[in-house]
Image (spheres, coloured by chain):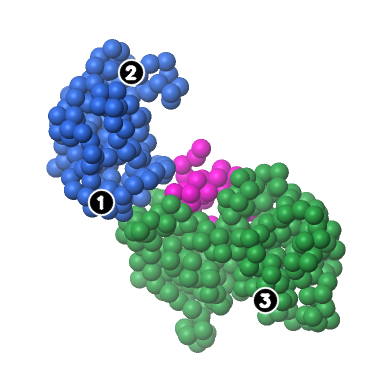
Amino acid sequence: MSQQLSTKHLLGIENLTLEDIELIFKTADEFKDVINRPIKKVPSLRDITIANVFFENSTRTKLSFELAEKRLSADVINFSSSNSSVKKGETLLDTVNNILSMKVDMIVMRHASPGAPHFLSRHIEANIVNAGDGTHEHPTQALLDTYSIRERLGEVGGKKVAIIGDILHSRVALSNIFALQKLGAEVMVCGPITLLPKHIQSLGVKVELDVRKALEWCDVANILRIQLERQQIKYFPSLREYSLYYGVNKALLDSLNKEITIMHPGPINRGVEINSDVADSDHAIILDQVENGVAVRMAVLYLLASVSK
Amino acid sequence: MERRLLLGQPQLAITISRLCQELIENHENFENTVILGLQPRGIYLAERIRARLEEFTKVKVDLGYLDSTFFRDDFRRRDSPVRANETRIDFLVEGKDVILVDDVFYTGRSVRASLDAMTAFGRPAKVELLALIERKYAHHVPIKPDYIGKQVNTIDSQRVLVEWKGAGVEEDTIWLINTEE
């Protein structure tokens, strides 16, 4: 197995190799052990400074990254655009170059524009971790999702995974499709036709409009939130109607005659895409995903920092 | 590449037995003693030491594997990164007499890192170090093994290769390799 990532930035799953993903998983195994000890901290990144630059709101991802950085003993600075000079008209490159002038080694960035971290990677030296770029990719989420599947089911290869919900606006969906396929899983997307991107079949995924059929097919259902904040037009008549046709509830799962693993990247809209009786059930690994998120992000930061030279 | 035999059989088995006898002298019934094999290669020696001790004393000493990768002081300073290995310690080292076990003692830096890594599992009463091979005159930090199988004089371009049965070879053997002709 390789000891080093093939890239110095984590821009998306699309640019990772299978060996990269396996190395991240193997390293995350050891970090998961570390964060379950009484003393949860290791000194690996003690001479590294990381800036979390968030141009878009985030709770879970930002906390998870910050915790991962602190567990690795990195120095952390936080930036969010809502209270910054971006509001005064500064460009992305200027903002980041100013941060880098303060001798920052790594940038963790979330941005509403797809490709923003790719643009940055062409102009700056620091390692960049994409924490979500618009509707494009969210690589660490896909890594922690597939890591959680591996943990629950033993392996990802050969498993059938259905991604259900708002595929059109989801960066989680695209990154998951890439990660699952690289690891050898079969992928299906399911949602109202208006929320499925055109030509999604060209990625080699199955497409299903009926949520029951999708659930009957899959071993794992990854249920996504309806991203109302990204929807400028109406894609379906009402949330109530969406819930009626695409909401996953216990009665539906009980009628399947099989057990499937339920995932959700959060935040959950209870009663819309998923009901509480499913989200809080033993089949759901939603909180495991959150725990694994810290371990996986520690692995990503650690491995990227080690290829900086 | 030229290689010279440092320890073959039966000398290696005799050395391990002698190291165990030294441990028995100092630890008597091993009531409060635990062994930590240092990843990646010290674990094989640690397994052998424990098995031999059990033959001598009928006591099965607690054994754990300790990985110090995340505690190393050469992160980002090496040409190629070190891969992390499993740490498996099912007990607390708080108040225990710990015997750290490694196959080759060279600069001492990985033992220093291991001492740091161990603090996550408690504060031991006492820590000792056992090394099968000590490379003399090469230490970078003021740390020395308490139990030594064999001391060798080496230069930087030489490497000590320890082959453990079970890791793909017929017999436990230790070689000194010249990497430069």
Q: Is residue A28 left or right of residue B120?
A: right
Distance, label 2 to label 3, CA atoms, is: 62 Å
Which chain does blue denote in the image? B
User: What chain is colored green?
Assistant: A
Residue A138, horizontal then vertical, whole percent: 60, 63
Residues at marks 1 and 3 touching, judged by CB atoms closer than 8 Å: no
Within-10-Å neighbours for mark 3: few <14, some 14–19, many 20+ = few
Q: Residues within 10 Å of mark 2 (few under 14, many from 20)?
A: some
In this figure, which residue is indicated by the disc labeled 3?
A269
**Amino acid type, residue under disc 2 in the picture:** Thr
Q: Say if mark 1 contacts mark 2, CB within 8 Å.
A: no
Residue B136 seen in this snapshot: no
Q: Which mark is residue B173?
A: 2
Of the residues under marks 1 and 2, which one precedes in the sequence? 1
Q: Secondary structure at mark 3?
A: loop
Disc 2 chain ID: B
Residues beneath discs 1 and 2 located on the same chain = yes
Question: The disc labelled 3 sits on which kind of residue?
Answer: Asn
Q: Quadrant of residue A67?
A: bottom left
> Which three-letter amino acid code belongs to the residue tagged 1?
Glu
Query: Can you identify the residue that label 1 sits on?
Result: B94
Q: Which-is-in-front pick, marks 1 and 2? A: 1
Magenta part of the chain = A1-30
Whole-number angstrom distance, CA of label 1 to CA of label 2: 35 Å
Picture residue at 18% right of the left edge, 45% below the top? B126
| Residue depicted at x 65% and y 64% | A281
Specify the quadrant of the image occupied by residue A230: bottom right
Query: Tag 1, which chain?
Result: B
Horizontally, residue A293 falls left or right of residue B25, namely right
